[in-house]
Image (cartoon, rainbow, N blue to C red):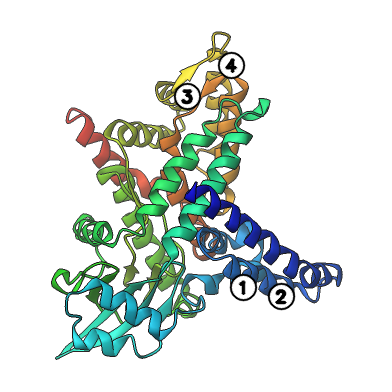
Amino acid sequence: MAVFLRVCVRMVQLIVLSALAAPSLLAAALAGRRPRNRLAAGVARLLERFGGAFIKAGQLLATRADLVGVPLAEALGRLHDEVRPMTEAQARATVAASFAEAPAFIVAAVSAPPVASGSIACVYQARMGERDLAVKVRRPGIAAAFAADIAIVTSMARALSRLPWLRRVPMAEIAEQLGASLMGQLDFAKELRHLGRLRDDLADVTGVVVPSAVEELSAGGVITMEFVDGLDRRTAGELTDGARQACVVRLVGAVYRLLFVTGFIHVDLHQGNVYFRRDGSVVVLDAGFMFQLGETTRERFTQFFSGMIRGDGEFCANILLSTVRRMEPDADLESFRKEAAALVERSAGAVAGDFELAAFAVELFDLQRRNRLFAEPEFVFPLLSLLSLEGAVRRWYPSMDFQIEAAPYVMHGLLLADPAVT
């Protein structure tokens, strides 16, 4: 009953906020082309007021200027690390509740404005002796807001899954898995472990930096880690083309290693969690929204990508069939093989600027639906990781052959599954 009431209150809150914002958004929309920035800013403010999981949605959209347009992507960009911060009193309360005796330097740090402010936490710069540290403090009450938002989205997904054209898409399972992963972002003890795992998994990727956590200074709703300087979203646009493209290659290599080799996926690669620095290094932050693929799913996804690289549509179609959860008695396997193979072959060899992963994924899911096959919901997570990465690649290095860049990591992943692969 308590959960139901929270969801009802949350829905009323969203309706009221939408109604209050509607007149100004409508006026901006009807005013023509010139006030487009005003409309974009209004949408960003509305998502910020919604809070909770809606800010996460805005952060994902901000990575896709190619899909939502530059004005809206830029307006949403501030949701990565410039959301309205919590008050000093709220930060102090979280710190006090997290430690039996809060370290004095952390208490002093949260008395100053944060250096970054996101949907779940604020980050403060602290000084302990000669060490510069970053202190991440969870927002109070954020768990209740996220739980209500996820319950709303899951209920909508269950309703949508009853529509005839969505019956074979595992909407409810996808929503539940995404919801569990989003709620996992609130578990700072888990994030602390994930941060160490992420740092270990990317240790061999040259030029990629993951800050180290300070476990003895982390507890409850507080994570303390090394402070990484030189983080500025504007840097990517100020680098030379060559330097920027080298950063993109490093970032793509890091993501491919996670996808194909370790299966430990970073699903939150927005501009507030990935920075290009002037020394050519790439900094990856925030291990809250991670997902561990099952070993079978990692192997199948890697095999599928290997087929993409070779342009072997029939091989890819058979891999996809091997991942199907179940099929209806009148499922048309031959039609699916033929259409999926054609889709892969059309996409093989495309550079980043000519390939749209979102359209590819939608067509793939539609093929499964039309041929009466039930998709594997776990495949959504690598697609989400690549979707957020694709925005940066299409913007900063559209001529990159992302399939060829994947080849060494795909081969490594295949060798893990079958040492006889050559």
Sort mark 1 into few (<14), some (14-19) or many (20+) by Cα contacts within 10 Å: many
Q: Is residue 419 above or below residue 267?
A: above
Along the viewing direction, whichever of 160 and 129 lies nearer the viewer: 160
Q: CA distance from mark 4 to mark 2?
A: 46 Å
**What residue type is disc 1 on?**
Ala
Q: Earlier in the sequence, mark 2 or mark 1?
A: 2
Q: Residue at x 49, y 60 (%)?
A: 145
Secondary element at tag 4: helix
- Please give left or right for residue 17 compared with residue 377 in the image: right
Write down the residue under mark 2. Answer: 37
Q: CA distance from mark 3 to mark 4?
A: 10 Å
Write down the residue under mark 4. Answer: 335
Sort mark 4 into few (<14), some (14-19) or many (20+) by Cα contacts within 10 Å: few
Contact? badges 2 and 1 (CB < 8 Å): yes
Residue 49, picture quadrant: bottom right
Write down the residue under mark 1. Answer: 75
Secondary element at tag 3: helix
**What residue type is disc 3 on?**
Ala
| Percent position of residue 405, x then y | 37, 50
Q: Is residue 293 above or below residue 209?
A: above
Sort mark 2 into few (<14), some (14-19) or many (20+) by Cα contacts within 10 Å: some
Q: Is residue 374 above or below residue 26?
A: above
Secondary element at tag 2: helix
Q: CA distance from mark 2 to mark 1?
A: 8 Å
Contact? badges 4 and 1 (CB < 8 Å): no
Q: CA distance from mark 4 to mark 1?
A: 44 Å
Write down the residue under mark 3. Answer: 317
